[in-house]
Every structure is written in C-alpha cells, then in structure tokens.
Image (cartoon, rainbow, N blue to C red):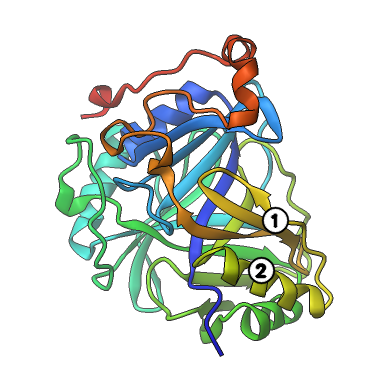
Amino acid sequence: MATLITGIHHITAIAGNPQKNIDFYTGVLGLRMVKKTINFDAPDVYHFYFGDELGAPGTVFTTFPFDGARKGTKGTGELTYTAFSIPSKAMSYWMDRLAKFNIPTSTPLNRFGEKVIRFEDHDGMGIELVANDQDERMGWTYGTIPLEFSIRGFYGATLNLKAKELTEKLLTQFMDYRFIAEENGRFRYGTKGKPGDIVDIVVDKDGRQGVQSAGTVHHIAFRTDNEKTQVEIQHKLLDNGYHVTEVKDRNYFKSIYFREPGGVLFEIATDEPGFAIDEDEALLGEALKLPTWAEPQREKIEKSLAKVSLNVEKYA
C-alpha cells in the first residue's frame, strides 16, 4: 500500500504583536521569512511563514499574529512544544545565543539518547531545540548565525493529551505512522523516525484543558505528496469515521482539516506547489502576497494591517 503521509508539513501558531513575532523567528532563531500574506479566513490578520531558504515542507513554522491578544495557556488537547532540529555541535552555541537575548532555557534534557533544551518565545510559545546528527538538511541563515549552527527544520512536536489510545490508533492505522519507543511516559511515533516526522504523545489524564490564544499552536499539518494522495487520505479518514473538511486551496498547498480524538486540530497539506509560485526565490517574504480573490481589496487590507519590517541585523 502506498505511503500517503510522509511527516510534518508545517505547524501554525497564534501570536501577539506581529513585529515582535517577525523579530523573534527571523532575528533570534534565524529562520527565513518565506511568505508574508493574510489569514485566508480572516483577511485583516497577517499570516507569516518562517522556514528554510525555500520554505520546504517540514521546516515551516507559521503564525497568525493578533496584536493585543491575551496569552493562552498550555494544557491538554494541545500541541504544547514545537521541536526544531540542530546539529549536536550547535547546542552550546544556542544556549549562549538565547542567553544573549535574555531568553531563559532549561538545562539540557536527555531524551531518547539526544540532548534537548526547552524555552518559550515572547508570547509563551513552547519551543525545543533537539541536538542530533541524523538531519541532512542544510538549514538557513541571514548571515547572523553561522550556517553550521543553523536550525535545520522541524524535529517534531509534542501532543499533550488526556489519553493516547485513540490518537495512537489514528496515527498508526490511518496516517502511516508507527510506534517507535516509550521513555518516562513519553510515547514516540514517526513515519521513518527521523527529524521532521516525529510526533510525541505525553499523557496527562488529570491535566487542565489548554486555552488557545497567543503563544499556543492552532494546528499541525502533515505532509502528503500531491492532490491525488490528499484525496486518498481524505477518503480513508472519512471511511473510518473521521470528520474531514473539503479540500481548501491555500495557494501554496491544498489542505484538509479534522480534529484528532484528543482535540488537536490536524491538517493534511500537499507538498505542491510551494512558495515560489508568486514570488522570485530571492525575494521570498518581502512583499505582501494576496490570493487572487483578495486582490480587489488590497488597499483596504493593507490599511488594516500593521506596518512590519525585517530587523535581522539587530540580532547579529
């Protein structure tokens, strides 16, 4: 049977101030801003995409910044920590860099034989850096971070759930994931078990439900090759009782959405066509790009959005 899901495509969070959001992910973490557009479901709100040079699937962290939004709270029914992959030799560099910008980090944690540090962005978003030497991706730098220490893309994500059985069934029976290992109550799953496809489940049966707002993840999107494989997985999920949306055109990929049994919003997104369809590769993220249906309202939309800019040089 053909593999329909090949790992994580992107992770989307709710943020607060849009300029602070850009400054943190491009300046502090050194991700490339590969697209500046709007939330297609709320056109008066930005949608930022941060990733590697071309925004390859498996590298892109995206945000909906709502200026003035109150902070959410981590809890059950949420993706609580997004993990990025770094080379093992980069761990001390990143601990020093985060300290330079007064960002508190955990002491290095040992997890499945790898070192992990945990911290939060200015909105309280849970972030981890996982040191490993299995990631062959190149990463990206604006020149402020040495390329050899740069973030390679996602390592994985942690789902905080009241129970794991039904979510595990979804992942392993219908989404091409397999159980890899368990350690200290953390259950790990992957398609191939490599950076970019890892999903961990942590069970907190008595935990409080998370509250979604700034600093929390809105959804996690999984990769599928194209529209044909997307329809196949859509039918597979529908046939097995999951409530899946129609296909939605997000310009840079096609999407379907559904809630997994623990409450986390899942998306299946196509690898095609990518972020270079409406912008030169060298200029990705510089102009405000709108979907065709929004172009007639460009003037109104631009007036409703706060002015933002790249300030990467401040974070050298």
Residue 12 in percent (x, y) is at 57, 47
Q: Residues within 10 Å of mark 2 (few under 14, many from 20)?
A: some
Residue 200 in percent (x, y) is at 55, 71
Q: Residues within 10 Å of mark 1 (few under 14, many from 20)?
A: some
Q: Which residue shows up at 61% across the image and 67% down it?
A: 230
Q: Do we see residue 264 in this rendering?
A: no
Q: Quadrant of residue 25?
A: top left
Quick check: 286 left or right of 264?
left
Q: Do we see residue 151 in this rendering?
A: yes
| Relative height, residue 311 to residue 133 (above, below) | above
Local SS, label 1: loop
Q: Quadrant of the N terminus?
A: bottom right
Q: Which residue shows up at 34% across the image and 42% down it?
A: 31
Q: Quadrant of the C terminus?
A: top left
Label disc, if present, on residue 131 of the rendered structure: none
| Relative height, residue 269 to residue 240 (above, below) | above
Residue 164 in percent (x, y) is at 71, 77
Q: Are marks 1 and 2 in contact (CB under 8 Å)?
A: yes
| Alpha carbon distance from label 1 to label 2 | 8 Å
Local SS, label 2: helix
- The answer to which of 136 and 276 lies nearer the viewer is 276
Quick check: 87 left or right of 26?
left
Q: Which residue shows up at 49% across the image and 67% down it?
A: 225
Quick check: 162 left or right of 197?
right
Most extreme residue toward the bottom, as rendered? 1
Residue 194 in percent (x, y) is at 38, 75
Give the residue type that dot 2 points to: Val
Label disc, if present, on residue 247 of the rendered structure: 1
Q: Earlier in the sequence, mark 1 or mark 2?
A: 2
Give the residue type that dot 1 points to: Val
Q: Label 2, on which residue?
A: 231
